[in-house]
Image (spheres, rainbow, N blue to C red):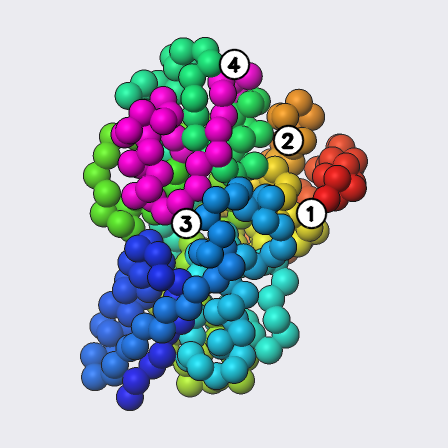
Amino acid sequence: MTIRVGTRGSKLALAQTDWVILQLKGFYPEWEFEKVIIKTKGDKILDAPLSKIGGKGLFVKEIEEALIRGEIDFAVHSMKDVPSIIPEELEIACIPERESPFDVWISDYENFFELPSYSKVGTSSLRRLSQLKKLRKDLEILPLRGNVDTRLRKWKEGEFEGIILAEAGLKRLGIEINYRRFTVDEMIPAVGQGALGIEIKKDNKKIKEILKNIHSIKTEICIRAERTFLRILEGGCQVPLGAYSWIENSKLFIIGFISDLEGERFYKFKEEGSISEPERLGEKLARKLLKAGGEEILREIYEKR
């Protein structure tokens, strides 16, 4: 039996897909898995920040369309790329155990806080940008897009004194480099960061059954809280926001923020609740941020679009 697996063609996307296939091969050694590489809008436009391109699902839409047409059996996504609302015919059937959700600082200046004033720091993420400005207003923050290798090369060639990357990407690619991990208090991750999502057609019961073998209930609960938060704040790449949920001592926690583009109006809260009600917790945090000033920030950002 051959299973067709939809994926983007980047080195990281292929590494993630290979990992999923390897896990499934452990349960179904006799099955064949064929990777189907699909180019997305986000892959085609490399010279502009994602916030400028606009739209949701920049790295998943074309893959979802192939899934709906029946050209692939399941798709492997980075959960942070998946919009909070997906097509009605589809579902995220499996979320394997999460890799590190944190961002890391890569620089010859190991301590981010000792970086000289006016140093150039590379990131194209509004979420990272606003939090960087909150931590250090004296830095020059410049756009940095491209795959992990491209970003590292630009830093090594001296375009930047430091760059920020997701730790999960470095780990999945097996890249060994010195870095300092940001704490969640310094840099709140993107919703779903470090987690993979495997998407299928709702009526594909057979594929759903086989994916149960690599599903993590614990990760799913945390992702449900984060994605509810995202859905209520209606944030895509155009809004500086982030959230991270975790389980500790049988309790569910979530921390999240929303900010204006300059990091001037910056609202951050933490909530705790029951692991049986992740959506309720995500919603509670989102509503609290909206009330504190998030609603005004969202209105201003969307009026400028």
Q: Earlier in the sequence, mark 3 or mark 4?
A: 4
x, y percentage for residue 74? Answer: 42, 75
| Image height of 266 relative to 51, above or below | above
Report the Cα–Cα distance between label 3 and label 2.
24 Å
Q: CA distance from mark 4 to mark 1?
A: 29 Å
Which x, y percent locates residue 303?
Answer: 78, 41
Count residues near mark 2 (Cα–Cα under 10 Å), then give few for <14, some for 14-19, many for 20+: some
Residue located beneath label 2 in the image: 261
Per the rendered image, the range of residues in magenta is 135-164
Looking at the image, do the residues carrying marks 4 and 2 touch, with CB atoms under 8 Å apart? no
Secondary structure of the residue carrying numbered label 3: loop
Identify the disc placed on residue 138: 4
Measure how far apart labels 3 and 4 are at the Cα level.
Answer: 29 Å
**Which image quadrant: the C terminus?**
top right
Whether residue 100 can be seen here: no
Q: Residue at (28%, 21%) from the top-left corner? A: 108
Q: Amino acid at mark 2?
A: Leu
Is 273 left, or right, of 107 in this rendering? right
Q: CA distance from mark 4 to mark 2?
A: 15 Å
Say what amino acid the circle numbered 3 marks.
Gly
Between discs 4 and 2, the one toward the N terminus: 4
* The N terminus, quarter of image: bottom left
Residue 33 in percent (x, y) is at: 28, 77
